[in-house]
Image: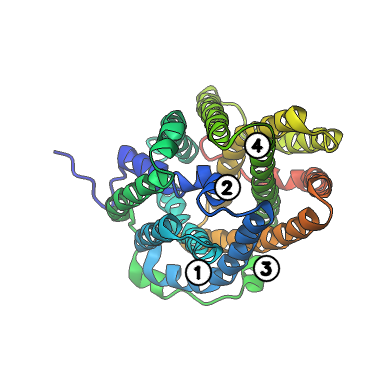
Amino acid sequence: MNTPSKNQFNKKIFCWYQSTSDDLLFWCWFDVLILSLNYDLTAEQISIVFTVSFWISFFMKFPADVVAKKIGPGRSIMLAAGMFLAAAIFLTFGTSIVPAIIGQSLYLTGLSFQSMSTIIVKNAEQRDPKRVDFISIMSLSETIAAVISLVASLLMDLLFGINSNLPMYICIIFCISSCILAFMVSRYDNISYDEFNKWHEMSPVKILKSLDKSIISGIVLLGLFMVIFTVSGNNLKIMITDSLSAITTEDNTVFHFSIILLVSRVVKIVSNLFLNYSRKKGINPKNIIYVVVTSVFLISVLGILNIRTFGYKALTFAVVAFLFRIVLYDPFRFVVNSYLLQHLDVKKQTDVLFIQSIGVDLLTAIVSGIATLLLHLEGMNSVMLMLLALSLVLLALYYILRKNFENIDDERA
């Protein structure tokens, strides 16, 4: 029997781990719906939960980075699995805004440790690039996760009908299995802990100065994209939920939301299958960056054209925009992350992930706070205008920085 060792990366085990542990399953799909139905929170209160949690997770990034450097990637993903389990328990059994914030904060902080899994698979690719392909493996993991969520969306109406907390009970079960899989994947961490613990302490500013300009360009683009993705996603889900509540009953709201989620999972599967197809056909991944950045801007323009619509028209735009986000998300982040981590040793890789993480969290917290204030004072229209402005900045940055990406070679080309 071939037993995986620290130096023998097992693609199947990693894909199952990543697909069930990359996010807090069930909660990440139904968060707004659960907060609205189970917690009975308003749109403004839900926005407060997301914003406060982002600020907490941002300040937790710094001690999390210190811990991750002390314990290494393998133990970091095990810690992340434990934090996800704790978050699921808070979010399942909480009944007010406070446990919701605690659970969401644990979940977001756990993502910092879970991101270390990308270092494990990237180093496996660098050791054996013919057998291990970072982009394909991460894409396959997301495809499996999308299939799981596809099944969940089919059963969503039934699950909420039986017990509105049942999806989160299942979430806890997934978190327990994630702890087991995290332990198995941690064995593929072949990094010397003696070397890891001798890491020199550097401030974020010194880390930035030590990085190549092309790497910084990638961090900036990915960070801004993630901010737009997160803020637009939260507000689009609020828009969808509010639109459904205005035109149908609570029971039908759950049913229609499950249909939207079902379609989104199909879209996600197709998106990742196409990404894998493009890898096999040798399509230059740099082209994906251009397509995604341009598409984000065009979607934002369409949003402005629809800001004064209501009812079914507003619901249609929110759903279409929500689906397009999903099409663009995985290809962009996998391609850019692969570029950022290649040809770097593990120390630099963790520095890149740390800078990327705190940058995204800081910008997201600020932008989410502004979005919450605008939503409360001016309504959703002002939030859409803000997202258009950010999309325009993203497009401009790409054209300014695009030459830097020519210095980043696809090691599998």
Labels 4 and 2 touching (C-beta < 8 A): no
The numbered disc on residue 209 is 3
The image quadrant that residue 336 belongs to is top right
Viewport quadrant of the N terminus: top left
Residue 65: mark: 1
Dot 3 crowding, Cα within 10 Å, few <14, some 14–19, many 20+:
few
> Label 3's element?
helix
The alpha-carbon separation of the residues under discs 1 and 2 comes to: 29 Å
Gap in angstroms between the C-alphas marked 3 and 2: 39 Å
Q: Amino acid at mark 2?
A: Val
Foreground disc of the pair 4, 2: 2
Task: Give the labeled residue for mark 4.
Answer: 325
Under circle 2, the secondary element is helix
Q: Which residue lies at the image location 29% right of the left edge and 48% below the top edge?
A: 177
Q: Earlier in the sequence, mark 4 or mark 2?
A: 2
Q: Earlier in the sequence, mark 4 or mark 1?
A: 1
Nearest the viewer among 266 and 355 is 266
- Marking on residue 32: 2
Q: Quadrant of residue 26?
A: top left
Q: Earlier in the sequence, mark 3 or mark 2?
A: 2
Labels 3, 2: front one: 2
**Residue at horizontal 79 percent and vertical 38 percent from the top:** 300
* Residue at image location 48% in from the left, 55% down from the top: 115
Hey, what amino acid is under mark 1?
Asp
